[in-house]
Amino acid sequence: MNKTSIDNNLITTEKPNKVAIVVLLANTGLMWFGFFMLIPLLAVHITHELALGAGLAGIVLAVRQFVQQGLGLFAGPIADWVGYREMMLAGLFIRAIGFAWLAVATEPFGLMMAGVVAALGGAGFEASGKAGLAAVSKGYRRETIFSLSATVGNVGMALGPMVGALLIKVNFSIVGLIAAVIYLFAFVLLWLFVPRIKQTHTEVNGRPTPADIFGKLGEVWKNRPFVIISGLLIGYYFLYVQINITLPLMAVKLTGSEDSIVPLYTINSGLAIFLQYLSVKMLSKRLRPVTIITIGMALTTLGLASIMFAQSFAMLIVCVVVFSIGRLLVEPVAFGITARYATDSTMASYFGFSSLALAFGGMFGNSLGGYLFDTGNNSGFPGLCWLVFGIVGGVVVVGLILFSLRESRSTNQNRSRIVPVAIAASPNED
């Protein structure tokens, strides 16, 4: 019988578990709210309040990004082994500690270590969270579920900077401590309302074998199309993280006020709130996933590169609109691709591996973004960073087009080898 059951506090995922989906979506909104209440203001806090420079701000953000996403490579297989819910709970608790530490850190070493602790928490819940959502929503079109998750997250992304901008006028420490409390609240929600999610393992005497933990990474690595698309997404994340470093710094440069950061995030997330779910749903019916990602990447690149010519805050806003439209197309489709490549027993391993794209892209994007922003302004060429972003994005767009052509040829060749005896209905996720 094809039905969802909860036995011994386990969720089986033969059909969607609606309660778990709602709680995981709500937690996404909470986490994005807490994250974006703190992180965009962290660069401004380090640069202006602590007077430590944009370069250091970029390094702190880069270290946090790289540690979190880099560890996702290992956190994913561990989550496939110990359970998605358990990894999420541990990650939320550790992230709360890291954000509380960021609230009080004032020296470079303390800021760096607090960022590392926050990153450890993120590694715990990121891959496991996506895998858990994919597991409990089995039976739905996953691109749609992930676009809905991104929409909810963008509500938090829109509101977070607004609240953070108000609180930072009192004290940055207040921002960090409230962000930490939000993650603790998400921890409680998950613990109370989402039972453990049953997973598939290779077992010996009722226990997963040691090879089952990390051996799945070998399976992922053999999936070369997935590895290639993950590699190309490094360039996307290189551009994406500029929302946390160069875009806020550019807004403050043009206006002289930290309040100008809020409209950037309001537009960036507001467009996603109103357009992401419907646009991804409609485009997914008409275009191949890689084509949608290519279009989104081209718009993201155009938006950032055009900032080179922005001489006013209004012009910056126009560029952010183009950037944001591109972004809302890429991420849910990329997550959907990852879920389709994976199996039930390797879901978190695939999401963990895919996090390497954000690890490297985020590390280079944050560190080089801050460095190029400073270097360009100090050398009399303020458009330097935006020019580099345009070049990087252009290379990735070309790579995506070539990848799409390669996959189309491969698909056509495979179809030509198949003798069409009968067409069986496959268990898709529509």
Image: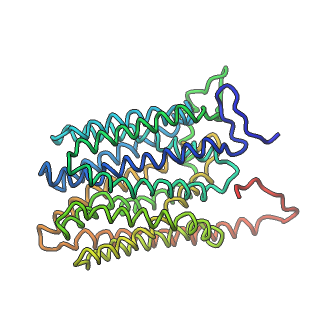
Q: How is the image coloured?
A: rainbow
Instruction: Assign the N terminus to one quadrant of the image.
Output: top right
Is 209 positioned to the left or the right of 91 in the image? Answer: right
Residue 147: horizontal and vertical position, in percent? 55, 59
Residue at image x 67%, y 20%? Answer: 205
Q: 210 or 101, which is in the foreground?
A: 101
Place residue 417 in its image quadrant: bottom right
Above or below, 404 relative to 62: below
Q: Nearer the viewer, residue 131 or 396?
A: 131
For residue 195, side relative to residue 317 (left or right): right
Q: Residue at x 25, y 47 (%)?
A: 60
Q: Position of residue 168 (x, y in %)?
A: 23, 50
Image quadrant holding the C terminus, namely: bottom right
Q: Quadrant of residue 282?
A: bottom right
Q: Percent x, y for residue 319?
A: 34, 74
| Residue at 16% across, 74% down | 381
Q: Residue at x 70, y 55 (%)?
A: 429
